[in-house]
Image: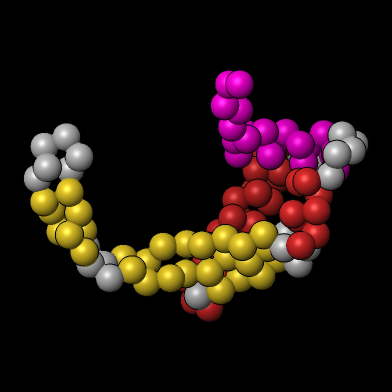
Amino acid sequence: MPRINLTKKDLINSVYMQIGFSKSISENLIDDFFYTVAENLKIEKKLKLSKFGTFSIRSKKSRIGRNPKTKEEKTISDRDVVLFKASKEFKDLVNSKNDS
């Protein structure tokens, strides 16, 4: 099965078709949404979207990694990673057998 990506352009077209805003306004709306989500997550370290899920940031310590081809060891720096935990409603929607 080929991989199908949902792009920002797809989201813009969806808002344009469903709500009727111009493509320019639809693009600004999507950009503002993503910016608000990212900024909130950076500040609060956790963001819950009701009936969708929770994004959170977890800090990972530095560690030794290994290139599987060359077996060369390298230090992987400490960093923050984003985690997502789907809500029960979202899991139920994804697992529903109904195609509507």
Q: Which residues are magenta?
A: 1-20
Left or right of residue 53, residue 45 in this image: left
Q: Is residue 26 magenta?
A: no
| Image point (82%, 34%), residue name | 17
Residue 59 occupies quadrant: bottom left
Residue 13 occupies quadrant: top right
Residue 75 occupies quadrant: bottom left
Q: How many marks?
A: 0
| Image point (69%, 39%), residue name | 11
Residue 72, x across and y down, in percent: 9, 45
Residue 51, x across and y down, in percent: 78, 63
Q: Is residue 63 above or below residue 21?
A: below
Pick whichever, 68 or 58, lies toward us.
68
Residue 30, x across and y down, in percent: 65, 49
Left or right of residue 62, residue 57 in this image: right
Residue 19 in sight from this viewpoint: yes
Left or right of residue 88, residue 57 in this image: left
| Display colour scheme | secondary structure
Pick whichever, 75 or 50, lies toward us.
75
**For the C terminus, which image quadrant?**
top right
Left or right of residue 19, residue 56 in this image: left
Residue 82, x across and y down, in percent: 47, 62
Specify the farthest residue to the bottom.
44
Q: Which secondary structure dominates the residues rendered in magenta?
A: helix
Q: Is residue 6 magenta?
A: yes
**For the N terminus, which image quadrant?**
top right
| Image point (21%, 64%), residue name | 63
